[in-house]
């Protein structure tokens, strides 16, 4: 699931999710808009979403399908 879709379904703002996940809001914005995250931040997002958004889902759009 894409992070943008998760945030919408959960009714969370990027700011609230950033607080819950421990990832800077600027990095959440980047992920929502198709940029990748560091492995560490991607793991934090995966944990904060209970696996609904996976590390593979957070790959930059030009790298999806390579994982």
Image (tube, rainbow, N blue to C red):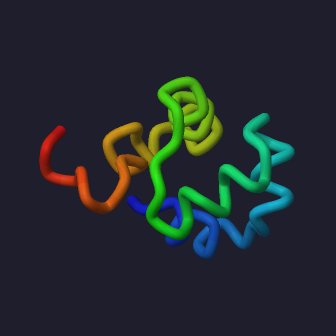
Looking at the picture, tell me which residue is in the foreground, 51 or 26.
Answer: 26
Give how far across and how far down residue 63 sits, in percent. Answer: 24, 51
Give how far across and how far down residue 29 sits, in percent. Answer: 66, 63
Give the residue at x 40% y 37%.
Answer: 55
Task: Say which quarter of the image contains residue 14.
Answer: bottom right
> Farthest residue in the left direction?
66
Location of the C terminus (image quadrant): top left
Up the image or down, 2 lies above or below 43; here it is: below
Task: Say which quarter of the image contains residue 15.
Answer: bottom right
Location of the N terminus (image quadrant): bottom left
State left or right for residue 21 relative to residue 37.
right
State left or right for residue 5 relative to residue 64.
right
Q: What is the total number of numbered labels drawn onto the structure image?
A: 0
Looking at the picture, tell me which residue is in the foreground, 65 or 16.
Answer: 65
Give how far across and how far down residue 41 sits, in percent. Answer: 60, 33
Give the residue at x 72% y 72%.
Answer: 11
State left or right for residue 28 relative to residue 18.
left
Give the residue at x 64% y 38%.
Answer: 48
Give how far across and how far down residue 43 sits, in percent. Answer: 53, 29
Give the residue at x 66% y 55%.
Answer: 28
């Amino acid at each position: 699931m894409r992070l943008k879709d998760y945030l919408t379904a959960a009714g969370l703002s990027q700011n609230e999710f950033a607080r819950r996940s421990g990832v800077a809001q600027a990095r959440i914005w980047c992920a929502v808009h198709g940029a990748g995250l560091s492995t560490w931040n991607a793991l934090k997002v995966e944990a904060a979403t209970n696996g609904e958004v996976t590390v593979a889902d957070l790959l930059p759009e030009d790298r999806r399908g390579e994982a």
